[in-house]
Amino acid sequence: MGASGPAELFDVAGRHVLVTGGSRGIGEMITRGFHAAGATVYVSARTASACEALVEELGERAVALPADVSSVEGVAALVEGLSAHTDRLDVLVNNAGATWGADIEDYPDEAWDKVLALNLKAPFNLTVACLDLLRAAATADHPSRVINIGSVDGMRTPIWESYAYSASKAGVHQLTRVVGARLAREHITVNAIAPGIFPSKMTAFALETDEEGIEESVPLGRVGRPDDAAGAAIFLSSRAASWVTGAVLPVDGGMVTLQ
């Protein structure tokens, strides 16, 4: 069998893609990237107005599905809403997340509950809830895809005291491997992207204080851009990555190499 040409190799047109936390930050970057590449995107986030504003801007092939995936009830409502629009799901992007920073002696128990519920439990619960839709789209030659958004902070000691966040993202990476092993025989791949510093609500406090210093700390000399996030997600959803599962892909400008 000969190799596919570049256009076919990275084509995701016609795919049905659900992105949680898809209305801002890295999630918005990924949503916009898939939409521009011809996919139908389902934008989910807790704030309905943010989802609807992005969908209105994107136009055709964009659907707003606001939901809070930190609870089992929220996951069920999201999948019910998704099922009203499509009978298959080609790509699930588990991006919704939260962080919490505090000194070690002041780190509250509620931080662990909030962060682990959204960052670690939600990707598992939503993946399980979407299995029938993922199975409906999956074939041996064109597997369905689950993409979990981890973090470089789950691969190295973080800069800030974000204990629950970094621990949850390390858990996301391991969850990716475990669920990937379980679903491989069903032609569903499970991979993770481990982003470095991208402009977002989570990083705004740092970039507003010392953007130049942060950029200088990144080996490749800059923070992440929309194409960096979207390109990694599209690659993992394309034919080019149809034989890749259980992988954690750093998209961090080389920060993971510093430790």
Image: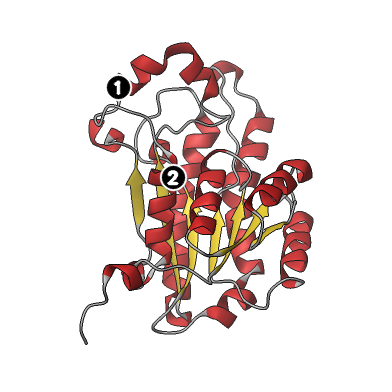
Nearest the eye: 160 or 132: 132
Q: Is residue 11 above or below residue 156?
A: below
Residue that appears at 57% across and 20% down: 102
Residue 161 shows in the view:
yes
> Where is mark 2, residue-wise?
170
Crowding at dot 1, Cα within 10 Å, few <14 / some 14-19 / many 20+, comes out as some
Looking at the image, what colour scheme do you see?
Answer: secondary structure
Helix or strand or loop: what does disc 2 sit on? Answer: helix
> Where is mark 1, residue-wise?
217
Residue that appears at 49% across and 30% down: 199
What percent of the width, then of the height, locates residue 35? 54, 57
Crowding at dot 2, Cα within 10 Å, few <14 / some 14-19 / many 20+, comes out as many
Nearest the eye: 157 or 237: 237
Give the amino acid at mark 1: Ser
What percent of the width, then of the height, locates residue 60? 65, 61
What percent of the width, then of the height, locates residue 42? 65, 59
- Left or right of residue 93, residue 141 in this image: left
Residue that appears at 47% across and 36% down: 166
